[in-house]
Amino acid sequence: MNFELSEEQKMIQQSVERFVQENYDLSSRISISSKDPGFSSEYWSSMAELGWLGLTFTEEEGGFGGNQIDTLVLMEQFGKGLVLEPFLANIVLGGGAIKRSESKNLKETIIPSLIDGSLQITLAYAEEQSRFDLNDIATSATEEGDGFILNGKKSMVLNAESADKLIIVARTSGSQTEENGISLFIIDSDSEGVVLQNFPTVDGLRASEISLENVKVSKEGLVGEKDKGFEILQAIANDAILALAAEAVGAMEVLYKDTVEYTQQREQFDHALSDFQVLQHRMVDMFMEYEQCKSLLFRATLETVQDPNMAQRTIHALKHLIGKSGIFVGENAVQLHGGMGVTEELRIGHFFKRLLVIDSQFGNADFHLEKFTNISS
């Protein structure tokens, strides 16, 4: 496999790296996170102007014809600054659903506005009882007249507070845990019967609990084929795992580099902490975990680009490793910084919290280990 980025991808990487260095020191991030809407609208507009929001859409849709590798380039750099702008919610989740729709009208009305940053969208897929099972959907969509009526609740919906439109995963037929019978619908976030409970998350982002009571949606609001939405949902989840893994790799790089730098400066018994062999071994372990994650991330991403159906087992392995290694690197970074590692004034704790949340999104390490073992090689 060729792990080399193209010249265009290297230029994007450098551009994003420069953006993060110039705009995302810890105090700036805390300031942005503490104000509504929880991210910088100015930065979001800049991302649109730079073409980042259109990278993974086809040229026919107004994008640049990129793929998951381009998302990897962006998200790895975003992870180094814990970027707050809702790229995952808008482009990977919401945009991922729209670009897989068979509706030309839906693509033409939504995608250009996603690319220019004027429209906010997100995917409401998780439910209280479902834990990590994408197929466990209790929210119902009942056919009535020339449309559907939605009823149910959705949990931990990223960026719903700012979203103009919501993509709701609902059940149109079958039992609660059947893969068949799942459909995706797009609705306005201010539709009658939609109630949002918004809250900040531990990693500085925003999420919502959504209640749907007799929400009307026309048949034109159906994203993809009725009852056949699980395949789209699984593909979106895989893209999200790759994006989150790339963000985690970026965060892990910052954690181990900050830890090495700190131990070179901090002295104990007239020696820098980095002189002590036991700590050297610990930091080598951190570096090795980071490198393994990065290698597996490249493999899973390239396999997904070449053949998404063959990549599923590798994606499970990646998410397991990201969860396990992210917690290992975070815990050791905090420990080697001592009490300072958990203070708000030092960025170590912020990165560790983000890695903990990434482990819990779209299935934690244990969940994906079980999935991995159940797929024959």
Image: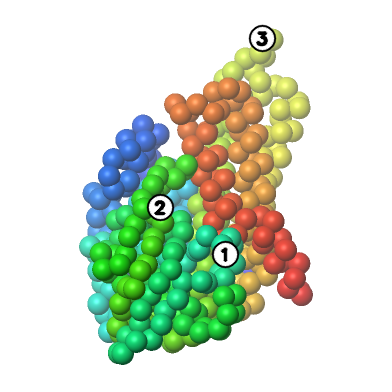
Residue shown at 76% from the left, 26% from the top: 277
Which of the pair 298/27 is nearer the observer?
A: 27
Viewer-closest of 235 and 172: 172
Q: Farthest residue toward the top?
A: 270
Q: Which residue is mark 3?
A: 270
Marks 1/3 in contact by CB < 8 Å: the verdict is no
Q: Which residue is mark 1?
A: 130
Q: Is residue 193 above or below residue 178?
A: above
Q: Are marks 2 and 3 in contact (CB under 8 Å)?
A: no
Counting from the top left corner in percent of width and height, residue 199 is at 39, 47
Q: What residue is drawn where x is 54% and y is 51%?
A: 358
Q: Classify residue 149 as left or right of residue 351.
A: left
**Disc 2 designates what residue?**
207
Q: Secondary structure at mark 3?
A: loop
Residue that appears at 40% across and 34% down: 26
Rendered location of residue 335, percent (x, y)? 64, 28
Q: Position of residue 232 (x, y in %)?
A: 49, 77
Q: Secondary structure at mark 1?
A: loop
